Image (cartoon, rainbow, N blue to C red):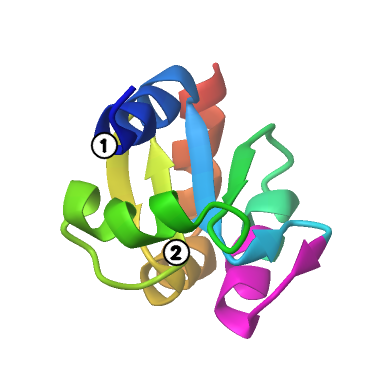
Amino acid sequence: MDILEEIKQIVEENKIVLFMKGNPDFPQCGFSMRTAEALKTCEVPFQSVDVLANPDVRTNLPKYSNWPTFPQLFINGELVGGCDIVMDLYEKGELQTMTKEAVA
C-alpha cells in the first residue's frame, strides 16, 4: 500500500487520531506533550501515531495534510491543526465538545 493511502486509512478509520512525536505516555517534544495532555483531559479514546517511529509517515503526512509541523490532530477525518490550534480550542472548551461529539 502506498504511504499516502496508509495515512488516509489511519485518518479515516479513527474518529480521533494524533500524529505526534513519541506517544501520549512518553511524548518526545513539548508540543506533542501539550496536545496529548489536552486530549487526555477530554476523556475520550484516541489513536496516536508516533512519527519518529514511522519515518515514512513523518515525511509524507505534511503532503497529505498540507500542514508542515507536528503534532497533527485529525477528528472525523478532518485536520484540526497543531498544538497552538488545539490548545486554543481546549481553552475555549471547544476541543472537549468536538471530541465528545466525534465519539458519540
Q: Within the image, what quadrant is residue 67 found in?
A: bottom left
**Callout 2: few (<14), some (14-19), or many (20+) C-alpha neighbours within 10 Å?**
many
**Callout 1: few (<14), some (14-19), or many (20+) C-alpha neighbours within 10 Å?**
some
Q: Magenta stretch?
A: 26-36
**Mark 1 highlights which residue?**
4
Q: Position of residue 71 (x, y in %)?
A: 47, 65
Give the position of the C terminus as an image quadrant: top right
Q: Position of residue 40 (x, y in %)?
A: 73, 51
Q: Within the image, what quadrant is residue 5 found in?
A: top left
Question: How far is the residue under mark 1 from the one under mark 2?
Answer: 24 Å
Q: Earlier in the sequence, mark 1 or mark 2?
A: 1
Q: Is residue 102 above or below residue 28?
A: above
Instruction: Determine the residue positioned at 54% across, 52% down.
Output: 54
Instruction: Determine the residue positioned at 42% across, 72% down.
Output: 88
Which amino acid does the dot numbered 1 rest on?
Leu
- Furthest residue toward right: 25
Q: Position of residue 79 (x, y in %)?
A: 29, 47
Residue 76 appears in view: no
Q: At numbered mark 1, what does the secondary structure look like: helix, strand or loop?
A: helix
**Mark 2 highlights which residue?**
86
Which amino acid does the dot numbered 2 rest on?
Val
Instruction: Determine the residue positioned at 58% across, 46% down.
Output: 49
Q: At numbered mark 2, what does the secondary structure look like: helix, strand or loop?
A: helix
